[in-house]
Image (cartoon, helix red, strand yellow):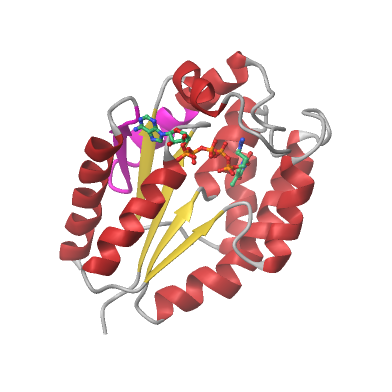
Amino acid sequence: MPKGLFVTLEGGEGAGKSTLARILQTALIEHGREVVLTREPGGTPGAEDIRELLVRGEPERWSAMTEALLFYAARVDHVEKVIQPALGRGAIVISDRFADSTMAYQGAAGGIDLARLKALHHLTLDDFQPALTLLIDIRPETGLARTRGRLGQEVRFESKALDFHQRLRICFQKLAADEPGRFVTLNGEEDTNTVATRALAAVMERLSDE
Ligand code: Z5A
């Protein structure tokens, strides 16, 4: 049986995570692997219910700490019920966002000390982390322009000011620099095919390391 691999996609709004996740899923299934495509917040019925609380409503509806606790409540359910069982049966799990998003959104951009968020992660999930994190780095102006005009109610984070999105980008870049063994940074300004080719190469390299 192949070993499971946990891959996460991170980056700001409109970076192209969901697009890339679908392309990777198709390519890896063609390589004969079971692929579980999932997302945060969400991924289980309970975590999807928590998502509704998080992504709708006024931008200042929750404090950053309340958000962090809600994201972790959803994450623990997701890890226990979907991610760990899939890894246990040898699947590749691709999650559209995971814990690095909490570090960036509630930490650097929301003002919570990263050490407190790391303590929350340790308390709830021990040291469980992805084997590979693909960071799609993009200027906030480019990402927000891609999502502008999108219909729907999940606009709570997108409505935050541009400097919030700039702080996010800097935090993601710093997280990647701090853990070069886990992160691979992709240039999200490149066309979809180029981003996908580079991402697939990174996943295949990680699989061949096993
Ligand atoms: N959040 C948080 O605060 N803390 C946490 O711990 C977690 C999350 C886990 C919901 O996430 C919100 O929760 C999120 C952060 C917060 N903030 N917001 N909003 P989400 O993942 O559901 O929302 P999102 O990041 O905004 O997703 P998104 O806007 O859909 O972005 P995306 O998935 O990265 O992009 P996409 O849908 O693949 O692409 C957007 C458009 O660009 C689409 O028309 C594509 O066809 C196009 N696209 C994609 N790639 C390209 C390239 N390479 N070139 C040109 N055009 C492209």
State yes or no: residue 207 in magenta. Answer: no
Residue at screen point 67% across, 33% down:
112
| Residue 124, x across and y down, in percent | 64, 61
User: What residue is at 49 percent from the left and 78 percent from the top?
Assistant: 85
Q: Count all numbered tags in the image, as a single digit.
A: 0
Image x and y of residue 43, in percent: 59, 62
For the magenta stretch, what is the residue range?
A: 171-188
Quadrant in which the C terminus is drawn: bottom left
Q: Position of residue 34 (x, y in %)?
A: 34, 74
Q: Is residue 97 above or below residue 112?
A: below
Residue 44 vs residue 135, the one in the foreground = 44
Residue 206 occupies quadrant: bottom left
Q: Nearer the viewer, residue 144 or 126?
A: 144
Where residue 66 appears, as percent x and y from the top left, is 79, 43
At a point 45% along the width and 75% down the height, the residue shown is 86
Please give left or right for residue 195 compared with residue 48 in the image: left
Identity of the residue drawn at 34% across and 72% down: 4
67 shown above or below 148: below
Q: Is residue 175 magenta?
A: yes
Task: For the N terminus, give its image quadrant.
Answer: bottom left
Q: Is residue 47 left or right of residue 59?
A: left
In the drawing, does residue 31 fall left or right of residue 149?
left
Residue 82 image-quadrant placement? bottom right
Please tell me whether residue 143 is drawn above or below residue 85 in the rendered image: above
